[in-house]
Image (tube, rainbow, N blue to C red):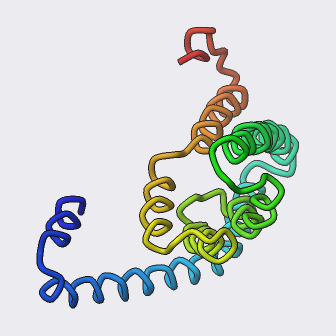
Amino acid sequence: SIMFGVALTLVPERRSRQVLRLLDKTSKVLVMVMHMVMALAPIGVAALIAQTVGVTGYQVFGALAGYLGVVALGLTVHALLLTTLTVRYLTPVGVGAFWRAAWPAELIALGTASSTATLPVTMTVAEDNLGVPQRISSFTIALGSSLNMPGTALFQGAALLFVAQAFGVDLPMGALLT
């Protein structure tokens, strides 16, 4: 896709215009598909929870509450420290203005735990609330949602510990550090 994009920029605009329009329309359709999936996601999550409770019983909620607490604490520390410091020292936007503008995307991220699912909302927030040009937001946000995943790293580390504890596996310090 990168080579295709580079090649598309090298083709004269009069010849690439139709392909660019098609890709733009395809992108809009895919964003709509993502909105539809997000609308159905709560039903799927409820079904997964019901199945888990049916198999393991209600005691699973205590263990899950601890797990969710650890993940929520880690994500909160990440958001409040790293994101706030980044906004404060690397952008011209004030921290308060940033968080007020970013709030809709943050709520979607909290509800879906997916940077890809938040992509359409994040792009809208960046463009409409923060004044980021569409050319920049469509490239950087899509790239960032694929490459910058500290929440996923934190989530996977906490999940590893949760599963190990749930099955009574004692992890040595070397495995924890890895």
Work out whether 48 lies above or below 77.
below
Name of the residue lying farthest toward the front: 92
Work out whether 143 lies above or below 37.
above
Q: Residue drawn at (53%, 63%), measured in percent from left and top?
A: 116
| Image location of residue 175, percent across then percent down | 56, 15
| Image location of residue 163, percent across then percent down | 66, 33
Residue 97: quarter of image: bottom right
Residue 80: quarter of image: top right
The N terminus lies in which quarter of the figure? bottom left
> Which residue is at the front of the view, 36 or 13?
13
| Image location of residue 89, percent across then percent down | 68, 41
Q: Residue drawn at (82%, 39%), measured in percent from left and top?
A: 73
> Which residue is at the front of the view, 4 or 75?
4
Give the side of residue 154 with respect to residue 16, left or right.
right
| Image location of residue 30, percent across then percent down | 44, 80
> Which residue is at the front of the view, 43 or 86?
86
Work out whether 66 lies above or below 113.
above
- For the image, the number of numbered tags is 0
> Which residue is at the front of the view, 175 or 111?
111
Q: Residue drawn at (18%, 72%), measured in percent from left and top?
A: 8
Give the side of residue 41 with respect to residue 94, left or right.
left
Residue 29: quarter of image: bottom left
Q: Residue drawn at (63%, 15%), measured in percent from left and top?
A: 171
Name of the residue lying farthest toward the top: 173
